[in-house]
Amino acid sequence: MKRSTQLKRTHALCAARRLRSGERGQSLVEFVLALPILFVVVFGIIEFASAWRTYQVVTNVAREGARLAVIPSTTADATVHAKIDSLLVQSGLGLANRTTTLTCDGNPGLCSGPGATGRPDEVQVDYSHTFVVLGPVLDLMCAGCGASYGTVVLRGRTVMRNE
């Protein structure tokens, strides 16, 4: 009787090992299914952090441009445009993706000269930010999903009154 109990245990252990050895591929399949989702989350965090940094730079550049625009000694639009361009380049952003608009009371150009005191100058900087990784990663998961995540326009707008 002892011998038959031992044989039953041995057969049960062998059956359990066979069952477990068939599950070895399950963890690999689960990993392969979860990996694309993990990639989207990680690259999404990186891409949105980059976009947020660019947005902060654009907002700061618009603010600095408006500060320069309202100073009484600034009489030329080109001076403000040059300052904005230099700040964008110092921040590592290209000039090809930006659009700068200067307006005074809704009209193009700066408020300058006699009677400009108290009138608002508005500086608006639009910058096209392209998502480099997120769009292609989403396209790998499903065709056409990443097309809407290509480029977004980030806008910095500041209005200040002339001194």
Image (tube, rainbow, N blue to C red):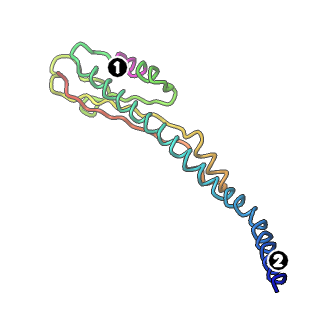
| Image quadrant assignment for residue 68 | top left
Of badges 2 and 1, the one in the foreground is: 2
- Gap between marks 2 and 1 measured at Cα: 85 Å
- Pick the quarter of the image with the N terminus: bottom right
Per the image, the residue denoted by label 2 is 11
Query: Is 44 placed above or below 121 here?
Result: below
Mark 1 belongs to which amino acid?
Val
| Image quadrant assignment for residue 90 | top left
Question: Who is closer to the viewer here, 162 or 94?
Answer: 94
The magenta stretch spans residue 115: no
- What residue lies at 31% left-to-right and 28% top-to-bottom? 63
Seen from this angle, which residue lies furthest front?
A: 2
Seen from this angle, which residue lies furthest bottom?
A: 1
- Estimate the x, y position of residue 124 in percent, counting from the top left: 35, 32
Mark 2 belongs to which amino acid?
His
Per the image, the residue denoted by label 1 is 80
Q: Is residue 146 left or right of residue 100?
A: right
Secondary element at tag 1: helix
Q: Write the start and end of the magenta stretch as one range.
A: 77-85
The magenta stretch spans residue 83: yes
